[in-house]
Amino acid sequence: MKTERIINEQYVDEKCRAYGISQDEIQTELVKKLTQKGIKISTAESCTGGLVSKKITEVSGASEIFECGVCSYANEIKNRVLGVENSVLEKYGAVSYETACQMAQGVKNLAKAQIGISTTGVAGPTGGTPEKPVGLVYMGVCVNDSVFAVRGEFFKTSGRENIREAAAKTVLLLAFEEVSKL
């Protein structure tokens, strides 16, 4: 049985302070660390719609560590391109721990990268349900053969763009933390 790690809006702020970086520097520090270690990263995005890839590619030198980003808004693309099992999508839904894990693993394998990261959630303002409200985002990280996801509860964040921004920064920070362990 998996245990979901739950994070919220304060996670990025607290961790960035601990690392001595600003939230605007997360992608720069991640690209720097990936470059130093010779590690490639790939992205699979649903609710962030390419924002994570955009943030990575804003950094000069990103082409050394980034070759593939998949915007997989539709379940059919999650399945056909990323290999998310239809049974997972049917049982747990697109916005789930299981889907985020399979998306991260799928894009890592597709790109032949060492790291795959993913986002899938409800950015709103519509589309939320009592079980999966606006602001719920799962972020997956697959490093080599290890994969996990975290549940982001960005319920105090208002607005679609702010939720997407919070999810993008969070998954980049999660990747930074994992690369730091390698």
Image (cartoon, rainbow, N blue to C red):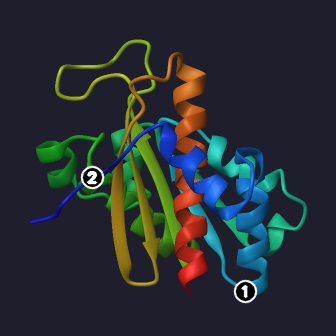
Relative image position of residue 137 (x, y in whole percent): 39, 39
* Depth order, front residue of 179/122: 179
Residue 15 vertical position relative to residue 145 in the rendered view, above or below = above
Disc 1 marks which amino acid?
A: Gly
Look at 59% across and 77% down and name the residue there.
Answer: 179
Task: Please state if 125 lies on the left or on the right of 113 as rendered.
Answer: left
Which residue occupies the extreme top position in the image? Answer: 126
Look at 43% across and 18% down and name the residue there.
Answer: 124
Q: Would you call the spot at circle 1 few (<14 residues within 10 Å), some (14-19), or many (20 or more)?
A: few
Residue 141 vertical position relative to residue 5 in the rendered view, above or below = below
Relative image position of residue 167 (x, y in whole percent): 52, 41
Residue 85 visible in the shown view: yes
Disc 2 marks which amino acid?
A: Tyr
The quadrant in which the C terminus is found is bottom right
Relative image position of residue 130 (x, y in whole percent): 18, 20
Task: Please state if 151 lies on the left or on the right of 68 as rendered.
Answer: left
Residue 77 vertical position relative to residue 135 in the rendered view, above or below = below
Marks 2,1: beta carbons within 8 A: no
Relative image position of residue 141 (x, y in whole percent): 44, 65
* Depth order, front residue of 163/101: 163
Q: Quadrant of residue 162?
A: top right
Task: Please state if 159 lies on the left or on the right of 53 as rendered.
Answer: left
Look at 11% across and 46% down and name the residue there.
Answer: 91
Q: Which residue, given by chain and number where applicable, does mark 1 sit on?
A: 38
Which residue occupies the extreme right position in the image? Answer: 60
* Depth order, front residue of 136/51: 136
Q: Which residue, given by chain and number where applicable, does mark 2 sit on?
A: 97
Q: Is mark 1 on a helix, strand or loop?
A: loop
